Amino acid sequence: EEEAAEYIEKHVSKPVYAYIAGRTAPPGKRMGHAGAIISGSRGTAASKVAAFEEAGVRVAKFPHEIAHLVKNDSRR
């Protein structure tokens, strides 16, 4: 996700919306698939959200919020 955020920031001019699962995982609980790697501060739910927000991506806290974000942005 951090790499996607970097790409979006440099190459995408249209609005992008995201939802990151695992934000409510208990501390120390591993989430994701077997290939998921957390390296330093990268790879955590918080670092993914921060990277997307820094790239201008609107990040929903819950999946159902995405439609509301899109609708509100379309009114601008």
Image: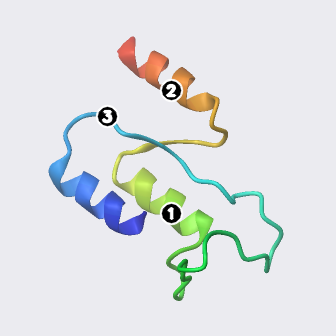
Identify the disc placed on residue 15. 3
Whether tag 2 and tag 3 are in contact, CB under 8 A, the answer is: no
Q: Amino acid at mark 3?
A: Pro
Q: Which residue is mark 2?
A: 69
22 lies above or below 15: below
Quadrant of residue 52 within the rendered picture: bottom left
Quadrant of residue 38 within the rendered picture: bottom right
Q: At numbered mark 2, what does the secondary structure look like: helix, strand or loop?
A: helix
Q: CA distance from mark 2 to mark 1?
A: 18 Å
- Please tell me which residue is depicted at 55% across the width and 21% down the height of the picture: 68
| First-in-chain label (2 vs 1) | 1
18 lies above or below 21: above
Q: Amino acid at mark 2?
A: Leu
Horizontal placement of 17 versus 62: left or right?
left
| First-in-chain label (1 vs 3) | 3
Q: Which residue is mark 1?
A: 48
Q: Position of residue 49 (x, y in %)?
A: 52, 57
